[in-house]
Image: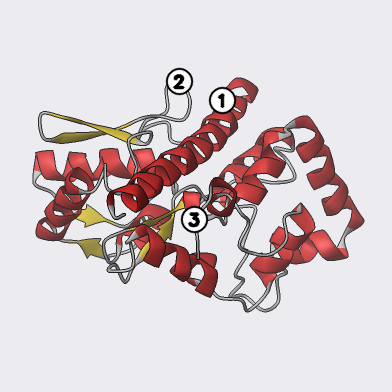
Amino acid sequence: MEISKELLIKDLKEFNSIDKLFLFFTSAQGDAEYCEEAKQCYKELKWNQSPFYDVINSFWITFSYAMHLKYPEEYPIAEAGNVKIYKNHYKKYDSFPEKYFKNPKARNRVTALCNEYTDMKELAELCHTVANFMPCPQGFNSAKGLLSDVRDYFPLMIDKIQECVDEGLNLKYSNTSEEVDNETIKEWHSFFIENQEKYCLSMYYKIEDKKIVGNPFFKGQNLSHPYPTNNDELKMCLETIKKNINNRADLLFDKYSKGLKSNK
């Protein structure tokens, strides 16, 4: 396999519409970051030594808050983030993607949302691409998705790790007794310092005096204000995510190309 910029931003679900994204969410298909084509790219990029990977920017979380912002009474936000639940564990309730296919009103709501926020369609296409995947420490992706003050936003997870390191605290999951011990958090901290350049992650966080600092997706985003709550914040969040994925694809391709030349 030869890496190209187009390959790095290729939708690995083999489809790119909102319809097909929701089909992916309701299917039994495994996580896209572990599909065979992704693994082949990891081998070329020399990432294949890692057994664990994460989707950097979730489509679902920002889509959820966008639906809540546009239709606040119809789509309330639960503690975990929702409009959801896309992998539904409660048989008597349809997940939102299931409702989307059965209920014309839900479908029309999504169509109107995507017409208003056109970057939402692009995020659906860029979500499951190698440029939006990264190697990560074991357990990192679960914590990023479950913490109520992180809400699956990578820069906020960076800030959360630094906060735990600074205060010597374990990382406690929201509404459960589970936690990640501080020694493990320190290992995660070291991982992101040591691998920022290797995995081309500089658009998501900076390193200052051995501290990691997340680069917010919109003005004012922080652990106390994790998700967009107005139109301007949502537009900026979508625009920043889209730009970061494309910029990272450029960096990855440049790094890969230089590696090829140096090996000749």
Instruction: Check contact, mark 2 vs mark 1: CB within 8 A.
Output: yes
Residue ID for mark 2: 219
In the rendered structure, which amino acid carries the disc numbered 3? Answer: Ile
Place of residue 152 in the rendered image (x, y in percent of width and height, measured from the top left): 44, 49
Please indicate whether residue 106 sits to the left or right of residue 11 in the image: right
Residue 172 falls in which quadrant of the image? bottom left
Residue drawn 65% across the image and 52% down it = 83
Residue ID for mark 3: 3
Residue 44 falls in which quadrant of the image? bottom left
Considering depth in this image, is 191 or 153 the residue closer to the camera?
Answer: 191
Identity of the residue furthest to the right in this view: 104
Considering depth in this image, is 210 or 140 the residue closer to the camera?
Answer: 210
Q: Residues within 10 Å of mark 1 (few under 14, many from 20)?
A: some
Please indicate whether residue 100 sits to the left or right of residue 37 in the image: right
Identity of the residue furthest to the front in this view: 264
SS at circle 2: loop
In the rendered structure, which amino acid carries the disc numbered 2? Answer: Lys
Please indicate whether residue 43 sits to the left or right of residue 15 in the image: left
Residue ID for mark 1: 236
Place of residue 224 in the rendered image (x, y in percent of width and height, measured from the top left): 37, 32
